[in-house]
Image: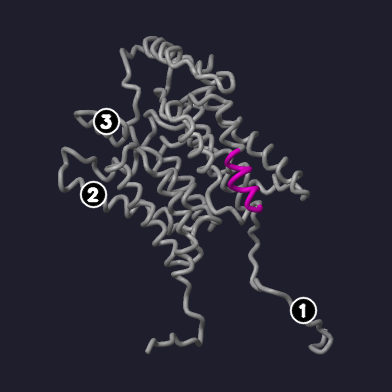
Amino acid sequence: MSTEARPLIIGSSPHIRVRQSVPDIMFHVCLALVPVVVFSVWTFGISALLLIMTTVIACVATEHVSCRIAGKATTIGDWSVTVTGLILGLTLPPATPLWMAVLGSIFGVAITKSLFGGLGYNCFNPALVGRAFLQIAFPITLTTWTPPNLVGRFASVLPSTLTMPFMRSDGEALQAYVQRALEAGGVDGWSGATPLSLWKFSETPQFEELPRLFMGSIAGSAGETATWLIILGGAYLIVRNMMNWRIPVGMLLSAFLLSGAFWLSDKSAYPSPMFMLFSGGLMFGAVFMASDMVASPMTTSGVWIYGFFIGIVTVVIRIFGALPEGVMFAILLGNAVSPLITSATQPRTYGLVRQKNG
């Protein structure tokens, strides 16, 4: 075809396109989360499986209904709401009643995502908002933990799992169930706390051994314990260029440096920086939540600032706040300032000269 016969196509940006699509990226995020889900079910049993299944189904159903109400085609096929359901389920304690999981799913998807226009328009991570809502509404339940690898975890569910909607879960029944399972496994007792809680509230701080923290044989939310699998999932996404590696690196590096400074000042009062990285939800939050493409900055310098900001706020909340964990609120604060960071770090347009005042 001659040059004169070629059609001139005029269109708006973007003019450079990549083969990756939203469904493709979200599907691979789901794949990266699969090992964490499997480990969670293996560690906490049927209750964890039912919890994660419930959040996924509830999130997908909420998105479908919201799309129908808005009069547009359903978007459940892009896998983004499946990722939301998986992350929400993995950030909840294994003993969370299923009706609370449904409530958090509806709130996170309908309020945070659908109400703002759907994927690409939400200001905050929907899974984190759903989790924060449950944390504020049901603080006791969201801080009730169960030990890992209980005997009989595949034969029965935790008593609180099937609690009727808006009924208070029977804490004594759960404690009795856990005690029987521990005795069956030859364990005398259990503190009922996560490593972070033991450090925060114990008169004599107890720092868990790093191998246990790294491998995941500890109490915690359903998907935050297996640090090694979380790192593998993040590496998989980075290799496939489906996650900005600067966000988790900046977040973990700033948390390491700040917690290390406190630790060096008084090693008997503050945990080591490695304990700070491997305990709680810091690793899971850095890899799978702070890296949300929609709620994070869009400039290279901006994502570094964003990551450092979240890491610093996490350590400050953990050390000086009333709660032992600070990842969730730190990421939500990071989501809130993300537009400001993007605006402040925009590169200068080529050819323009900054005007001098005066």
Q: Is-magenta flag for residue 112?
A: yes
**Which dot marks residue 192?**
none
Q: CA distance from mark 2 to mark 1?
A: 57 Å
Q: Which region shows up in magenta?
A: 107-117
Mark 1, residue position: 9
Q: Is-magenta flag for residue 94?
A: no
Secondary structure at numbered mark 1: loop
For the residue pair 30 and 256, the one nearer the viewer reads as 256
Specify few, some or many for label 3: CA neighbours under 10 Å numbering under 14, 14-19, or 20 or more: some
Give the mark, 2 or 1, whose residue is nearer the N terminus. 1
Q: Which residue is found at the position 36% from the left and 51% from the top?
A: 311
Specify few, some or many for label 1: CA neighbours under 10 Å numbering under 14, 14-19, or 20 or more: few
The image position of residue 318, as x and y in percent, is: 31, 42
The amino acid pointed to by label 3 is: Phe
The image position of residue 77, as x and y in percent, is: 71, 46
**Which dot marks residue 260?**
2
| Residue 24 in view in this figure | no
The image position of residue 121, as x and y in percent, is: 61, 56
Where 161 falls versus 13 (above or below)?
above
The image position of residue 104, as x and y in percent, is: 56, 35
Where 212 falls versus 80 (above or below)?
above
In this rendering, which labeled residue sits more in front, label 3 or label 1?
Answer: 3
The amino acid pointed to by label 1 is: Ile
The amino acid pointed to by label 2 is: Gly
Mark 3, residue position: 201
